[in-house]
Image (cartoon, grey):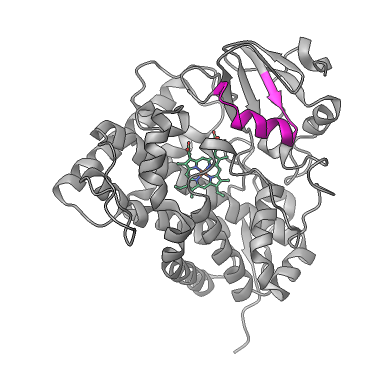
């Protein structure tokens, strides 16, 4: 296999979308040319972009690549992670085995499909409560603030034991971290604020323990509630626990919230698909996988750094170069999915990779699925006439954020007679 024509001229990560739901067209061209392209990062370094499903999956499963964020270039920030950045402590998304394994073992029991099934009644209650409030207050409504954002936010706060009433602060700081092209000082100030907030909370848990995850970790009870026991794990320092808490809080908020909002927008723009989901609610599991595939909100992909000189997708990657695997492009690869650019809620999608792949595959995926499987059908059931309240081109899209979605989704509906 030969290196593609883009190999000699590094270009920035494609960002321009012609359609709100399709990834940038440049990905398609690159997939057809051979899959790998030379990438120019904002820090001035050059690396690689992989676009085919097979190659992205290989990147994420290959231990010749590292997830160490202190060594990767960022596709969105021009400045490197500071060597003394405390936020890296406990942030296992940026670690390799054996360190990563230690954290993952400690936490995975809290996020199994079984553990999440125990949360279902509470998630249903939260969904119904928010939909009832939206119905009382409207129409119209902003679906982001009345439905998509508060549901995952309240769920993750309860699971972790983070006071929900503090959300205005930590959501504001998290937004700074997730916005593209922010200045270095602003990013570090937001990181510091988040760090101080979580550090204090960890301290509080030591003095006032409760039954939620953070408190159980702080106080050395590592078994999940209702789990098979109190398996103990290596103790974490308070700083490491702070990093874990922040990773879970931010990941738990921003992701599912955007899937719920963008997923609703996609369903409203494809009325035949929402109709199918209303008429055949039993297809919800397929619909959720299909929405994850079709929308792939981690829009700039996953980032790895080569530990050695190697070849992948025909590209000769040098040790130390950053390689970006585009999940959005992989999920539209026609060699893996037939008619990939069509949203089809009854499609039996087996291997979409919106949650990543390999050892870092999303820890919260069962929780996210549960929230979507509960949220979408409940929304469509309660509002059979739900529709956009503005022309489609007035819906503000999150081109400027690491996690794609909509900033606002103005919707309306007909009030039930009587
Ligand atoms: C990792 C996507 C929801 C927690 C990941 C990765 C992706 C992803 C692509 C892999 C990153 C990589 O390989 O570098 C998503 C999407 C979500 C979602 C699309 C919603 C639709 C959640 C939720 C949580 C969560 C609700 C709550 C706890 C995490 C954590 C990791 C992770 C802790 C790091 C896992 C590790 O490094 O072992 N997620 N996520 N995610 N996600 Fe999610």
Inspect the magenta stretch and tell me whether residue 55 lies in it.
Answer: yes
Left or right: where 225 falls relative to 49 = left
Quarter of the N terminus within the rendering: top right
Q: x, y percentage for residue 200?
A: 23, 39
Closest to the observer: 311 or 410? Answer: 311
Closest to the observer: 413 or 28? Answer: 28
In the image, residue 337 sits, relative to residue 305, either above or below, namely: below
| Residue occupying the point 73% across, 46% down | 21
Left or right: where 164 falls relative to 399 = left
Left or right: where 157 falls relative to 326 = left
| Residue occupying the point 41% across, 28% down | 98
Closest to the observer: 183 or 372? Answer: 372
Q: Quadrant of residue 114?
A: bottom left
In the image, residue 95 sits, relative to residue 43, either above or below, namely: below
Q: x, y percentage for residue 205?
A: 21, 47
In the image, residue 343 sits, relative to residue 312, either above or below, namely: below
| Residue occupying the point 60% across, 27% down | 62
Q: Which residues are magenta?
A: 48-65
| Residue 225 visible in the displayed image | yes
| Residue 139 visible in the displayed image | no
């Amino acid at each position: 296999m030969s290196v593609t024509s883009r190999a000699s001229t590094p270009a920035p990560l494609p960002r321009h979308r012609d359609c709100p739901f399709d990834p940038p067209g440049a990905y398609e061209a690159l997939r057809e040319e051979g899959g790998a392209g030379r990438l120019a990062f904002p820090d001035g370094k050059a690396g690689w972009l992989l676009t085919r499903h097979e190659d992205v999956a290989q990147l994420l499963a290959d231990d010749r690549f590292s997830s160490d964020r202190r060594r990767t270039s960022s596709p969105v920030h021009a400045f490197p992670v500071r060597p003394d950045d405390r936020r890296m402590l406990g942030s296992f998304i940026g670690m390799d085995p054996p360190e990563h394994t230690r954290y993952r073992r400690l936490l995975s029991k809290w996020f199994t499909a079984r553990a999440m099934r125990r949360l279902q009644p509470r998630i249903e209650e939260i969904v119904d409560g928010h939909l009832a409030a939206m119905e009382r207050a409207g129409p119209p409504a902003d679906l982001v603030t009345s439905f998509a954002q508060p549901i995952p936010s309240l769920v993750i706060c309860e699971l972790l034991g983070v006071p929900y009433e503090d959300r205005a602060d930590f959501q504001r700081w998290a937004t700074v971290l997730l916005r593209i092209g922010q200045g270095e000082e602003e990013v570090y100030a937001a990181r510091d604020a988040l760090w101080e907030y979580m550090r204090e909370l960890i301290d509080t848990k030591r003095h006032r323990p409760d039954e939620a995850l953070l408190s159980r970790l702080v106080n050395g009870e590592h078994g999940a509630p209702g789990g098979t026991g109190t398996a103990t794990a290596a103790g974490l320092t308070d700083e490491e626990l702070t990093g874990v808490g922040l990773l879970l809080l931010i990941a738990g908020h921003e992701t599912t919230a955007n899937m719920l909002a963008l997923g609703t927008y996609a369903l409203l723009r494809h009325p035949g698909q929402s109709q199918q989901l209303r008429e055949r609610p039993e297809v919800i599991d397929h619909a959720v996988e299909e929405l994850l595939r079709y929308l792939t909100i981690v829009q700039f992909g996953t980032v790895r750094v080569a530990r050695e000189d190697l070849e992948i997708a025909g590209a000769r990657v040098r040790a130390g170069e950053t390689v970006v695997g585009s999940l959005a492009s992989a999920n539209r690869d026609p060699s893996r999915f037939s008619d990939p650019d069509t949203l089809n809620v009854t499609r039996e999608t087996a291997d979409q990779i919106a949650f990543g792949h390999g050892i870092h595959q999303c820890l919260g995926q069962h929780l996210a699925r549960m929230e979507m499987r509960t949220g979408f059908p409940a929304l469509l059931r309660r509002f059979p006439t739900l529709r956009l309240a503005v022309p489609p081109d007035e819906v503000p899209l999150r081109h400027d954020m690491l996690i794609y979605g909509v900033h606002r989704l103005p919707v309306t509906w007909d009030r039930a007679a009587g």
